[in-house]
Image (spheres, rainbow, N blue to C red):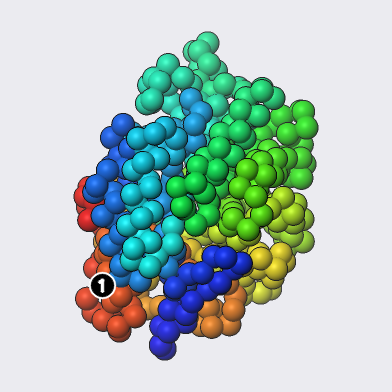
Amino acid sequence: MSAQALFKPFQLGSLELPTRVVMAPMTRSFSPGGVPNSKVIEYYRRRAAAGVGLIITEGTTVDHKASNGYPNVPHFYGEAALAGWKKVVDAVHAEGGKIVPQLWHVGSVRRIGTEPDASVPGYGPMEKLKDGQVVVHGMTHQDIQEVIAAFAQAAKDAQSIGMDGVEIHGAHGYLVDQFFWEGSNQRTDEYGGSLAKRSRFAIELIQAVRAAVGPGFPIIVRFSQWKQQDYSARLVQTPEALGEFLQPLADAGVDIFHCSTRRFWEPEFDGSPLNLAGWTRKLTGKPTITVGSVGLDGEFLQFMVNTDKIAQPASLEKLLERLNNDEFDLVAVGRALLVDPDWAQKVREGREQDILPFSREALTTLV
Ligand SMILES: Cc1cc2nc3c(=O)[nH]c(=O)nc-3n(C[C@H](O)[C@H](O)[C@H](O)COP(=O)(O)O)c2cc1C
């Protein structure tokens, strides 16, 4: 089957993508001091030059003392970091690509001892104590408003340095998802309770981002059923519940939903082959991005623990079938693009035999 469907342009309002290939957001931890440097610029430039239509950057932290959870993660605030990102934007644009930052707050996942201020604990929907010490600070209404303001400011800054939109990280058990998930949110105020109430934090956040950037600036929201704390967790069990969950987010200002799954071919609900991106597109009418083991024969969490497992290149046939059927609009590729900057070009030219396999080893360098 021809891979041509991946290389058709996509347009949504003023956002024009040269191809349907999206680089999935991947934390690389190569930005000491929170500043993306020349290696980071070159890393993203190479993917745009080889045919990635939209780059979603690695998670980049908003301006809040507890937003970061890992070493050498780039900031999306402060003069030096924003100047670094501006160079990334210019380099990607010069190659004809588009780029959005993934705006991130890790919430309760943060550990005391993490940069930038080692004394700051995690911040989450619920307080957590260990041996009498606060390891997660339960967020007050003021904290909530501060974090929302930090996301809005980051989005505004993204717009002013020429980014083509923003992605809000609402997936994988980080802060926004910690509010969505009943496993991490048992609040008894207006931010807790039913899923509709647990969505209030995200809704206010999206509304604030929309207000900051105005109409027409693309807002992507990434969400997932699975959590890093529990791979089998689910926010919703039925298509009806998914529709009820997503509609208020769409109404708040989302343009594109990025539906994070680990294996794109898995049906989301019994009785239909549609995956999460397929159902989301059908229920909301919004364009969607699919993701999960595209072009590889093993899913990504297997590789996050120490292992010498190797994921080999895999056929794109099932993916192309779904794309040709308009099940979703865009296809995010993670590890295949992490290890092989020329992945998209090789696929386009039918040079599958040249595509590189992925192993954990690839995480140690930025090529
Ligand atoms: C090294 C690495 C870092 C990741 N970091 C992020 C991240 O910062 N934000 C995010 O939403 N997902 C992150 N992910 C998940 C990917 O975006 C993607 O959903 C996942 O790798 C599945 O796609 P793949 O099978 O094509 O690799 C990361 C994945 C990897 C492998």
The structure residue drawn at horizontal position 32% and vertical position 46%, both measured from the top left corner, is 28
Query: In x, y percent, where is residue 18?
Result: 44, 73
Query: In x, y percent, where is residue 275?
Result: 59, 68
Q: Amino acid at mark 1?
A: Ile
Location of the C terminus (image quadrant): bottom left
Q: In this view of the protein, can residue 315 be seen by the observer?
A: yes
Q: Is residue 101 left or right of residue 92?
A: right
> Residue at label 1?
355
The structure residue drawn at horizontal position 38% and vertical position 54%, both measured from the top left corner, is 89
Q: In this view of the protein, can residue 309 be seen by the observer?
A: no
Number of numbered discs visible in the structure rendering = 1
The structure residue drawn at horizontal position 63% and vertical position 43%, both measured from the top left corner, is 212
Whether residue 265 is situated above or below residue 71 in the rendered picture:
below
Whether residue 265 is situated above or below residue 200 in the rendered picture:
below
User: For the residue labelled by badge 1, is the local secondary structure a helix, a strand or a loop?
Assistant: loop
**In the figure, residue 42 lies in which quadrant?**
bottom left
Q: Is residue 158 left or right of residue 366?
A: right
- Compare residues 43 and 332 and report the one nearer the observer: 43
Query: In x, y percent, where is residue 144?
Result: 64, 29
- Compare residues 226 and 243 and report the one nearer the observer: 243
Query: In x, y percent, where is residue 306?
Result: 28, 46
Q: Is residue 169 left or right of residue 363?
A: right
Whether residue 295 is situated above or below residue 204 in the rendered picture:
below
